[in-house]
Image: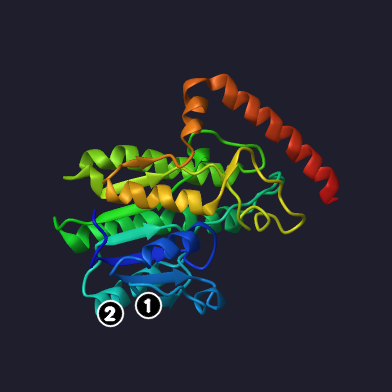
Amino acid sequence: MQLDHKNIILTGAASGIGRALLNLLVEFPAQLMAVDKDSAGLKDLPDGKAEIIPHNCDLSQPQAVDMLFEQAIQKLGSIDLFIANAGFAYYEKIETADWAHIEQIYRVNVFSPLYALEKMRILNNGRPHKVVIIASAMSFLGLPGYALYSSTKAALHRFAEAYRYEMNDPSCLMLVYPIGTRTAFFSAASRAHPAPQTWPTQTAEQVARAILHGIQRNSQSVFPFEAFRLFLAFPFLGKLEQAIESWRLKKWLRNAV
């Protein structure tokens, strides 16, 4: 997909990968709705060729997603590209049964992007469009401390794997699988104590450039850190990484007390 003169929605645009991607998208002559729950983060927006429309909402609520689409149609006229980047993680050892805790992360990480995907398909009704969902390398390799987060990303991956068989044009859906990204994402994953950074890592700018390249090439899957494919080809590397992260979780738990 070429991005000139396209109407774009980008969620999670205030920080991290979303902000890095916004900095790239603004260089195209397009209309862009920058969406985030953090209204303060949407006040200082980058200058460029794109017209940016900030939109503050809580994507965990279906009514908010409906309103987002209504506002986008009113202001943009149509939606060519939806980038579902918003999401969050818990870093924890699960010790209690907490329905609301589980539901919250699934609402944001799974329900919201899949609901937006279905709305985009109905809205465009055969018209060329694209939906990009930011998954994670944890879609393939669940890490200790991130059990719930890993499960949400695996759910996205399996849904896309099956859903593409139902699509007339499977290239309309692109999933992105970043490794640990050097942003405030990990420090925000725990209330008790900053979570350790997973290894290996990459920058938000590296991920953003890979996403942009994937959109322009109409890719279905994007691995911003190509060497991650070694973990898929050689399962013992994944087992080693899980063992290391298990040790780091135990160390974190001792320090968090």
Vertical comparison of 194 with 28: above or below:
above
- Which amino acid type is marked by label 1? Ile
Determine whether 171 is above or below 33 in the image: above
Which disc is residue 75 wearing? 2
Residue 52 is situated, as x and y percent measured from the top left of the image, at: 37, 75
Q: Which residue is mark 1?
A: 53
Label 1: state its secondary structure.
Answer: strand
Mark 2: few/some/many CA within 10 Å (<14, 14-19, 20+): few
Q: Secondary structure at mark 2?
A: helix
The amino acid on which the numbered mark 2 sits, given as a three-letter code, is Lys
Counting residues from the start of the chain, the first of labels 1 and 2 encountered is 1
Residue drawn where x is 23% and y is 43% of the image: 170
Q: Is residue 68 left or right of residue 14?
A: left
Query: Residue 24 occupies which quadrant of the picture?
Result: bottom left
Identify which residue is drawn at 52% across, 20% down.
234
Q: Nearer the viewer, mark 1 or mark 2?
A: 1
Kindly identify the residue that appears in the image at 71 percent across and 50 percent down: 195
Q: Quadrant of residue 84?
A: bottom left
The reply to whether discs 1 and 2 touch (Cβ–Cβ < 8 Å) is: yes
- Left or right: residue 214 compared with residue 195: left
Residue at screen point 67% across, 45% down: 197
Judge from the rendering whether residue 133 lies leftward or rightward of residue 87; answer left or right. Answer: left
